[in-house]
Image: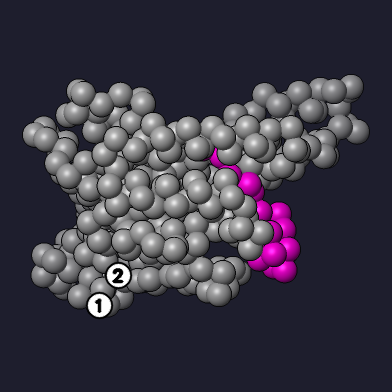
Amino acid sequence: MEIPGSKLSAFLFPHSHASEREIKSLLSFFDNLTIFQPWHIENQFSVPSEWGLRVLRPPEHLRPIEGFPSLLSEYKNWMRQCKDKGYASVLAAVQYGKSNDCTWDIRRSIRGLDERADQSQTSATQWHLLLHLARETEERLREAGEVLTVLREKGSPLRDAMAGDEAQEVLNDLSDFEPEREMDEEIIGRVFGAWHGLFSEMLKENASLITLSPPVFETLSELWSEYRSDESDEEILRFCWPDLSQLDTSEFHLKKSEMEGHERMREFKDALQEFMRNPIRQLKMLSGLAKGLERDSAGKGKEMLRFRLRIFGADPGPGLRKKMLNGVSGKFLFLLEESCRG
């Protein structure tokens, strides 16, 4: 993160994409948002850069091999042929170049990759593959979830063919399509490793990261706590903030300008920036300001965003999983947790 001043900046982590509503939700609070994207992903964001959105690619020396689109296409074909193997098998195949229980032998692509590139380019190419496939899987699950939500809200098209509420009950019994369902520690580690490998040199030590995934936030927090037994849940700050994502362009900027002049909101943001400069013994005061903000919005019928924040110290300590934690040491991690009504 840039040294806090008049602006609050954050880097989306470890996602390489977000919906328009998610971006507008994040920019309801942050002044600037940076999204890192691998090479060969088209920038299709409808939110203009003037809003504070910035999209960056990995450094030139971390470009994947020539012919990467063809290699990516092979992996996507393999994903379609091996749908029953799941997200974990896909990512394992990319990282280790093997899938013993699939008819299509993906190892031949990795062997070809080794022949065409040195080890650093091989690693960069594997990182790109991981993030591309992770994005595709998340988007498919997201789209399925959106369709299911619409059907639940508007009713099943089968309602005329099925008696009573039977069709709606079928929809309600279906599990939500969420990418987090398979996001265990191992998968988070692989995706985080790829993201960190491609983008870490573009981050300052005290960068402010924002994730949309509760499992990412919770996994990293739990791992950190294993090495820092003196820390507790009190080290995590919770706060709410008005959600401007449903507003059009003119209303969004007008409302955000009004919020800049709101005494309690300005006081909270200033205190948060000071906390980022020097977090020692300031969390309790910041938590008190957050509760004041929540009380101030209670009963006003405003759509509110709920955030969690934790700071990761400079040294995660020894341990087998220290490598994953090294990527977040010295940084602040925000979670856009859920919407709530004040």
Give residue 318's quadrant in the image. Answer: top left
Q: Which residue is mark 1?
A: 60
Q: Nearer the viewer, residue 320 or 307?
A: 307
Query: Could you tell me which secondary element the residue under label 1 belongs to?
Result: helix
**Residue 210 screen position, x and y as percent:** 42, 50
* In the image, residue 52 above or below residue 144: below
The amino acid beneath tag 1 is Glu
Q: Is residue 293 at least partly visible in the picture?
A: yes
Question: Residue 125 — which label?
Answer: none
Residue shown at the point (36%, 50%) measured from the top left = 274
Residue 250 in the figure: left or right of residue 276: right
Query: Could you tell me which secondary element the residue under label 2 belongs to?
Result: loop
Residue shown at the point (58%, 55%) measured from the top left = 28
Q: Nearer the viewer, residue 324 or 250?
A: 250
Residue interval drawn in magenta: 239-255
Q: Determine if the magenta segment contains residue 252.
A: yes
The N terminus appears in which quarter of the rendering?
bottom left
**Residue 137 screen position, x and y as percent:** 46, 49
Q: Which residue is mark 2?
A: 58
Residue shown at the point (16%, 73%) measured from the top left = 116
Residue shown at the point (19%, 28%) measured from the top left = 228
* In the image, residue 130 above or below residue 46: above
**Residue 122 screen position, x and y as percent:** 18, 64
The amino acid beneath tag 2 is Pro
- How crowded is the residue under tag 2: few (<14 C-alpha within 10 Å), some, or many (20+)? many
Q: Nearer the viewer, residue 185 or 282?
A: 282
Whole-angstrom CA distance, mark 2 to mark 1, is: 6 Å
Residue 4 in the figure: left or right of residue 46: left
Q: Nearer the viewer, residue 199 or 1?
A: 1
